[in-house]
Image: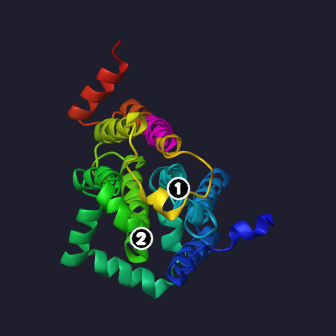
Amino acid sequence: MDHLAWLVPWEFSPTLLAAFGVAIVLFLRGRRVHRVTLARQWLFWTGLVLLYLSLHTRVDYYAERMFFIHRIQHLVLHHLGPLLVMAAFPGSAMRAGLPLHWRRRLRDFLQTRGGRVLVGVLTNSYFVPALFVFLVLVWLLPTVQFYSMLDWRLYRLMNWSVVISGFMYWNLILDRRPSPPAAMSPGGRVISPVLTMAPQMVAGAIITFTERDIYPLFELCGRAIGMSAQTDQMIGGLTMWIPAAFVEVIGLMVALGTLMRLSGKGRLRPEDRAVRYSQASP
């Protein structure tokens, strides 16, 4: 097969193209007036490319027909892609890329009651981590997985939901500011990946060691690669168990670095100092 054929979308989505196009244009425009280091640019473009390849190429065909590829796809959509993009701190550059009257409208909206409520929901330090874990687990329920893989509307909802929750979550965890103004405390950013990692690892272990075929849909549709259901399921479970946990450990280490930096500057609240000292104790 021609390698370029892999870039042809399995299911064309103009909405998806528009979303990527807007993000790219805003970032490029903002970069002209707002300083963005080469490292941040690399993180942004790498994350965006990984998200695009996972959502809008031939990879999607295999994700619909192999459980382990489906789990790798969601590893990128939920964990790695959003982590890389948010590690670039693109918000300031993308805001600068907006036309002036749009920036004013955005500022005015954020000062309204509706804007404050929206921001409060999108940055809630309890709701966002809970949603992050919930959307991993709920789409793994055999019945939910069955219908979401057969109905294109549910399938797109599944993929969009994990991407959006990934951006919301890593936006909290990678914030380098003290709280306030950050929505989550520095200590909470260290603890949260541990709490969100645990149920995903348990689910991955259960899938890995289950000897019956939990997801017969992939057998029904016909696996794209000659592999037994047990092997497919085991690799998919291991993908949730180990690589996904490793990505969360990366986020934890970044959050820990922020905690140490703020501690060195004396900008921690008492409860965050307690987390800092517990991390330092043997």
Q: How is the image coloured?
A: rainbow
Q: Reply above or below: 138 against 116.
A: above
Q: Position of residue 202 (x, y in %)?
A: 33, 36
Nearest the eye: 201 or 276:
201
- Find out whether residue 238 is within the magenta segment: yes
- Measure the alpha-carbon separation of dots 2 and 1: 17 Å
Q: Tell me the kind of residue under disc 1.
A: Gln
- Figure quadrant of the C terminus: top left
Given this view, does label 2 or label 1 mark the residue nearer the observer? 2
Q: Position of residue 194 (x, y in %)?
A: 33, 35
* Mark sitting on residue 185: none
Residue 35 in view here: no
In the rendered structure, which segment of residues is drawn in magenta? 234-254
Q: Reply above or below: 93 against 235.
A: below
Dot 1, how many residues are within 10 Å of its Cα: few (below 14), some (14-19), or many (20+)? many
Residue wearing tag 2: 150
Would residue 170 appear left or right of 17 to someone viewing this image? left
Taking the spot 56% from the left edge, 62% from the top edge, the residue there is: 51
Residue wearing tag 1: 73
Q: Tell me the kind of residue under disc 2.
A: Leu
Q: Position of residue 20 (x, y in %)?
A: 56, 74
Q: Quick check: marks 2 and 1 in contact, CB under 8 Å?
A: no
Prevailing secondary structure class for the magenta stretch in the rendered image: helix
- Find out whether residue 177 is within the magenta segment: no
Q: Reply above or below: 23 against 222.
A: below
Q: Position of residue 98 (x, y in %)?
A: 51, 79
Taking the spot 28% from the left edge, 43% from the top edge, the residue there is: 185
Residue 225 in view here: yes
Taking the spot 54% from the left edge, 80% from the top edge, the residue there is: 13
- Figure quadrant of the N terminus: bottom right
